[in-house]
Image (spheres, rainbow, N blue to C red):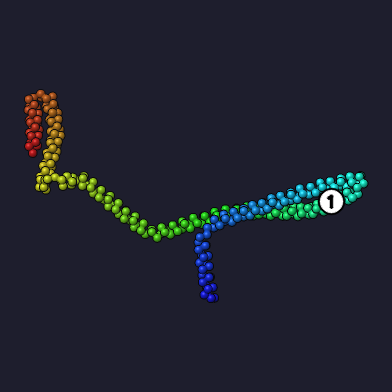
Amino acid sequence: MGILSRASYVVRSKLNSLLNRAEDPTETLDYSYEQMRDELQDVKQGIADLTTQKKRLEIQKRRLEENVEKHNDQAREAVRQNRDDLARQALEKKQAKMSQIEELEGQIADLESTQDDLVQKKNDLQGRIEEFRTKKETMKARYEAAEASSRVSEAMTGVGDEMADVSRAIERAEERTDEMEARSEAMDELVDTGAFDEAMSDKDSIDRQLETGRTDAEVDSELETLKAEMGGSSETEAEAETADVDVDAGNGDGADVDVADAEVEAELEELKDDEN
């Protein structure tokens, strides 16, 4: 293979590859369908033209037939007038018209035969066009489905290439979210424990410990007071019941003294607790 032949082959192969990539099958199918419809329209137009030509010949034939009748009448009239020469001329013209009529009939028969063939071809072409249209729509649907599937596959391939980056981004987002949640919980815990109050206060650690001690002492004192009140009430009620028994039994003054002594003792305990 010579250099020019190889170059020509390479150029043709490159052009063919470019055309294959640029070609859209759906557009090609639509174009082919339109071409077939145009051909069908041409066939219909040809049939119409042929029919028009046949009608013209038929009109011409009818006129010739009218002339034949006219020449017959002329010949009969010439015979009645003993004009054989005129009768002969009329009959000659009649024969010429008859020959033309015969020729026209042959042409009309040929046109009718051609017309029938064209009509049959038109029907066959129309049937093929309808069949092609069905196949075209089916092929277009298949091509569009395959194209969509190809796009999805390409998209999935691209997503697969970027999936590692997406996974890392999700991990970083989860770590950041966990960190923020932990920070929020820590802030809530510091607020609950009063750590922020201590940080914002001017008191040092000794002052805070002394204040805590005083608070604890006040709590202990109040607790002792509650215990004393509860215990005093119980003792008073018991002594009152005892006094009532003694009064009922002996109705003596010693019961009143015991009750008074118990009340004094209870009040004294309350005073001590207050001082503490």
**On the picture, is 47 further left or further right than 244?**
right
Please indicate, yes or no, whether residue 91 appears anywhere in the rendered image: no
Quadrant occupied by the C terminus: top left
| Residue at left offset 31%, top offset 55% | 172
Residue 151 locus on image (x, y percent): 47, 57
| Residue at left offset 11%, top offset 43% | 211
Q: Please state which of residues 180 and 99 is positioned toward the viewer in this rendering.
A: 99
Please indicate, yes or no, whether residue 164 appears anywhere in the rendered image: yes
Task: Specify the amino acid type for callout 1.
Answer: Lys
Q: Please state which of residues 45 and 254 is positioned toward the viewer in this rendering.
A: 45
Q: How many circles with numbers are drawn on the protein?
A: 1
Quadrant occupied by the N terminus: bottom right
* Above/below status of 226 relative to 15: above
| Residue at left offset 16%, top offset 47% | 199
Residue 226 locus on image (x, y percent): 14, 36
Q: Quadrant of residue 163?
A: bottom left
**On the picture, is 226 further left or further right than 188?**
left
* Above/below status of 23 relative to 189: below
| Residue at left offset 32%, top offset 53% | 173
Q: Quadrant of residue 194?
A: top left
Circle 1 residues within 10 Å: few <14, some 14–19, many ≥20: some
Residue 246 locus on image (x, y percent): 11, 27
Q: Please state which of residues 272 and 266 is positioned toward the viewer in this rendering.
A: 272
Describe the element under mark 1 as helix, strand or loop. Answer: helix
* Above/below status of 16 relative to 76: below
**On the picture, is 34 further left or further right than 79?**
left
* Above/below status of 244 relative to 50: above
Q: Please state which of residues 246 and 75 is positioned toward the viewer in this rendering.
A: 75
**On the picture, is 55 further left or further right than 245?**
right
| Residue at the disc numbered 1 | 93
Residue 95 locus on image (x, y percent): 85, 52
